[in-house]
C-alpha cells in the first residue's frame, strides 16, 4: 500500500509496463480537445457502425465495406435485383446507387430460369399488363404506392404520364421516376419543359428513361440545351414504340439523333421540331422514308432546313401525311410545288412566315391538283400570297372548308371574291390584318360563297369603311351562323344594316372594340336574327346603351346563353332588369366597367328562372356592400365570380363573401 500512496508518476503503475503499446492510443483516456466531435469514455463500449483509423490526434471513419466496391462489382449485384420495391429501396441509399441502378438496361438484368426464378409468375403477369390493368389489380389488393403527392404518376391515354417543369427537371428526379415506374411498365408519356439552371436534365437522365421505360410512346423536350444526340440515340435504341416526338430549343440535337429515331422508331406518327439549329435536310428525308405511319409534322425556325428536306419528306411520306405546319423556314416555291404534287393525304396545312415564297409557288401548289383532301389552310405573313395564288389554291382544293389568312399584304378584294366563287365547299373564313380588303370584298365574298358559308371572322382590317352599295348585294347568305368583327375602326352602322339584310340566321354574334356602331345600327341585326341569338359579345362597344341590350334580352331571352357587355360604360340596371325578366338559359354574363348598381344585382338574385354560372362585375364602381346578400344568393349556382376593382365593396366584406362562396372561384 505504501507504493500506492507514494506513487508520483515517475514509475509504472503496473510492473509489466504501459498497457498501451502505442503511446498515441492513450489519448482515449484524455479529455477530448476542441478538434474532436465525439468522446468515448474508456469505461464504456464504443458504439460505432464502421471501423475507425486512429492517428495523431484525430481519428477518421472508414467507408462501409460495400461502398469500397467499385462500380463494376455493384453493377453485377444490382443487375440481379428484379423487384421494383427492392430497386427503389436500393436507390434510396445514395445517389451513386441511384445512378448505377438507373443505368442498367432491361436486357442486362440477370434472371435465373427454373423453379428458383427470381421473378414470380404473378410478377410476369403484372409486367405484361398495361398500367390501367396493373392499377386495377393493385387497388383490389389494397396496394397503394408510397409516393409523395407531387410525384404521383398520372394515367393518361392508358399509360403513365409525367411532366417536369423548371426546377423539378433534374437528372436525379428523372432517374427516380424511371426506376419507380419501370416495375409498372414504365412511362408512356414524358414532358420536360425548361431545365434547372444548376443541375438540369442531361443525357444521363434521358438515358435512364431509355433503359427503364421501353414502352415510352410520347416524348417532349422543351428548352433543354444539355440534352444532346447521345441521349436521344439511347431513346431510339430502347424505346421502339415511340409515336410522338417534340423537341424545341434543343440546340445540342443534330441530324445524328433524328436519323437514329427514324431508323429505330417505325411507329412514329407525329414529329415537331422547333428552333433546333443543327437539324438538316438529311434527317427529314430519313423520317419520310423510314416512318410509314407518319401523319403530323411541324417544323419551325430551323435555319438548315431547306427545299431539299421538305421536298424529300413529301415525296416519301406524302401519301400518309395529314397535318403539316411550316414556319420561319428558308424554303422557296420548290417546297410548295412538292406539297401540291405529293400532298395527296394532306388535310391541314399551315404556312407561316415563309419570306422566300412567291406568287408562283402558291399558283403551282394549287394547279398541281394534289390537294384533293385538303380541309383547312392557314397562311400567315407570306408576301407571296396574292389574288392569283389564292384563286389557284381554291381551284385545286375542292374540299377546302376552312381558310385563315393573316398579314397577307398583297391580297385584295378581287382575289377574295374570286376565291369565294371557286371554293365550292368553303364554310369558315378568317381575315386578320389584311388591310387591302374593303367593304366591297367583304360583302362580295359573303354573297358569292355559294350559300355554304357558316362562319365569317374579320379582325384588325383597317381598309374596312362604311360605303353605300347598290342592289347587286341583295342576295342572301342564309347559311351564315357565326359573325365576328374585331377592332375594325371603319366598320359602322352602314355595314351592320347590310348584314341584317344578308344574314338572317346569325346565332353567334361578336362585335368587339367597334366604337363606330350605335343602337340604331345594331338593332336591325338583332331584330332580323330569326334563329335566335345564342352567344353575343359586344365588349368594347362604348356607344351602345340599354336600348339595344334590353332588346337582345327581350327578343332572344329564350335562346341566349352568353352575353358580354364588358366596357359598355352606358349599360345600367335597366339591362339587368330585362335579363332577370326574360332570359331563361343565360349562364354567362359580363357587365364589367358598366354603370350597374346594387339594384341590378338584387334583380338578378330574385330571378327564379335564372341560373348563372359565371358573373363578371369587374370595375363596377357603383356596386357596394349592399350587394353581398344578393351575391351570396347568386352563388348557389355560380362557378366563377369576378369582383376585381369593385372599390365600393370593403376588403373585409369580400373576404367574408369568399368564405361563404367556397364552391365558387372568386376573383377579388
Image (tube, grey):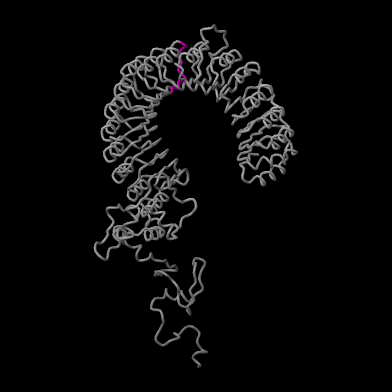
Which residue is most to the top? 470
Residue at x 40% of width, y 18% of height? 424
Q: Position of residue 130 (x, y in %)?
A: 36, 50
* Residue 657 falls left or right of residue 425: right
Magenta span covers which residues? 402-413
Residue 367: image x %, image y %? 32, 16
> Residue 365's spot in the image, x, y percent?
33, 19
Q: Is residue 547 above or below residue 577?
A: above
Above or below, comparing residue 395 to residue 246 in the picture: above
Looking at the picture, tell me which residue is in the foreground, 18 or 46: 46
Identified at 50% across, 21% down, the residue is: 480
483, above or below 474, in the image: below
Would residue 408 be counted in the magenta stretch?
yes
Left or right of residue 614: residue 210: left
Q: Quadrant of the C terminus?
A: top right
Determine the residue located farthest toward the left in the rendered image: 114
Q: Is residue 176 magenta?
A: no
Amino acid at each position: 500500500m505504501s507504493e500506492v500512496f507514494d506513487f508520483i508518476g515517475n514509475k509504472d503503475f503496473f510492473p509489466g509496463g504501459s498497457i498501451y503499446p502505442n503511446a498515441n492510443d492513450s489519448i482515449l483516456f484524455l479529455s477530448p480537445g476542441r478538434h474532436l466531435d465525439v468522446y468515448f469514455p474508456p469505461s464504456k463500449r464504443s458504439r460505432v457502425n464502421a471501423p475507425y483509423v486512429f492517428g495523431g490526434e484525430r481519428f477518421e471513419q472508414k467507408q462501409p465495406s460495400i461502398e469500397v466496391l467499385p462500380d463494376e462489382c455493384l453493377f453485377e449485384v444490382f443487375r440481379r435485383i428484379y423487384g421494383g420495391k427492392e430497386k427503389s429501396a436500393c436507390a434510396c441509399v445514395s445517389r451513386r446507387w441511384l445512378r448505377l441502378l438507373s443505368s442498367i438496361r432491361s436486357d442486362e438484368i440477370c434472371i435465373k430460369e427454373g423453379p428458383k426464378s427470381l421473378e414470380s409468375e404473378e410478377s410476369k403477369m403484372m409486367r405484361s399488363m398495361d398500367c390501367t390493368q396493373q392499377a386495377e389489380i393493385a387497388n383490389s389488393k389494397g396496394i397503394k404506392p408510397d409516393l409523395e403527392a407531387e410525384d404521383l404518376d398520372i394515367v393518361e391515354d392508358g399509360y403513365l404520364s409525367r411532366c417536369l417543369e423548371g426546377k423539378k427537371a433534374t437528372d436525379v428526379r428523372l432517374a427516380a421516376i424511371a426506376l419507380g415506374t419501370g416495375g409498372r411498365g414504365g412511362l408512356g408519356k414524358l414532358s420536360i419543359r425548361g431545365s434547372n439552371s444548376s443541375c438540369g436534365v442531361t443525357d444521363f437522365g434521358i438515358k435512364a428513361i431509355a433503359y427503364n421505360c421501353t414502352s415510352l410512346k410520347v416524348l417532349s423536350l422543351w428548352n433543354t440545351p444539355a440534352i444532346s444526340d447521345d441521349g436521344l440515340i439511347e431513346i431510339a435504341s430502347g424505346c421502339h414504340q415511340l409515336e410522338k416526338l417534340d423537341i424545341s430549343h434543343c440546340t445540342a440535337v443534330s441530324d445524328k439523333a433524328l436519323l437514329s429515331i427514324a431508323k429505330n422508331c417505325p411507329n412514329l406518327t407525329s414529329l415537331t421540331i422547333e428552333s433546333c439549329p443543327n437539324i438538316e435536310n438529311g434527317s427529314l428525308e430519313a423520317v419520310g422514308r423510314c416512318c410509314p405511319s407518319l401523319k403530323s409534322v411541324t417544323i419551325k425556325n430551323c435555319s438548315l432546313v431547306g427545299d431539299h428536306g421538305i421536298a424529300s419528306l413529301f415525296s416519301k411520306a406524302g401519301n400518309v401525311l395529314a397535318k403539316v405546319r411550316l414556319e420561319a423556314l428558308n424554303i422557296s416555291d420548290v417546297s410548295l410545288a412538292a406539297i401540291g404534287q405529293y400532298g395527296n393525304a394532306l388535310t391541314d396545312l399551315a404556312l407561316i412566315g415563309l419570306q422566300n415564297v412567291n406568287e408562283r409557288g402558291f399558283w403551282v401548289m394549287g394547279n398541281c391538283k394534289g390537294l384533293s383532301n385538303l380541309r383547312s389552310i392557314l397562311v400567315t405573313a407570306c408576301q407571296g400570297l396574292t389574288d392569283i395564288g389564292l384563286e389557284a389554291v381554291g381551284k385545286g382544293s375542292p374540299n377546302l372548308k376552312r381558310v385563315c389568312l393573316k398579314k397577307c399584304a398583297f391580297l385584295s378584294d378581287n382575289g377574295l371574291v374570286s376565291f369565294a366563287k371557286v371554293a365550292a365547299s368553303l364554310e369558315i373564313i378568317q381575315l386578320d390584318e389584311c388591310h387591302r380588303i374593303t367593304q366591297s370584298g367583304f360583302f362580295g365574298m359573303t354573297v358569292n360563297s355559294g350559300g355554304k358559308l357558316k362562319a365569317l371572322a374579320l379582325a384588325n382590317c383597317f381598309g374596312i369603311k362604311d360605303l353605300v352599295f347598290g342592289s347587286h348585294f341583295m342576295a342572301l347568305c342564309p347559311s351564315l351562323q357565326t359573325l365576328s368583327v374585331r377592332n375594325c375602326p371603319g366598320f359602322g352602322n352602314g355595314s351592320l344594316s347590310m348584314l341584317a339584310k344578308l344574314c338572317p340566321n346569325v346565332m353567334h354574334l361578336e362585335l368587339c372594340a367597334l366604337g363606330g356602331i350605335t343602337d340604331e345600327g345594331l338593332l336591325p341585326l338583332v331584330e332580323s336574327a330569326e334563329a335566335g341569338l345564342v352567344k353575343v359579345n359586344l365588349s368594347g362597344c362604348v356607344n351602345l346603351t340599354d336600348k339595344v341590350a334590353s332588346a337582345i334580352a327581350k327578343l332572344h331571352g329564350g335562346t341566349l346563353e352568353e352575353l358580354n357587355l364588358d366596357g359598355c360604360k352606358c349599360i345600367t340596371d335597366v339591362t339587368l332588369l330585362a335579363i332577370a325578366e326574360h332570359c331563361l338559359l343565360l349562364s354567362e354574363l359580363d357587365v364589367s366597367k358598366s354603370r350597374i348598381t346594387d339594384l341590378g344585382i338584387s334583380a338578378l338574385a330574385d330571378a327564379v328562372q335564372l341560373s348563372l354560372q359565371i358573373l363578371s362585375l369587374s370595375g363596377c364602381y357603383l356596386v357596394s356592400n349592399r350587394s353581398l346578400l344578393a351575391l351570396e344568393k347568386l352563388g348557389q349556382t355560380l362557378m366563377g365570380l369576378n369582383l376585381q376593382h369593385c372599390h365600393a365593396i370593403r376588403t373585409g366584406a369580400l373576404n367574408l363573401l369568399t368564405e361563404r362562396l367556397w364552391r365558387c372561384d372568386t376573383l377579388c
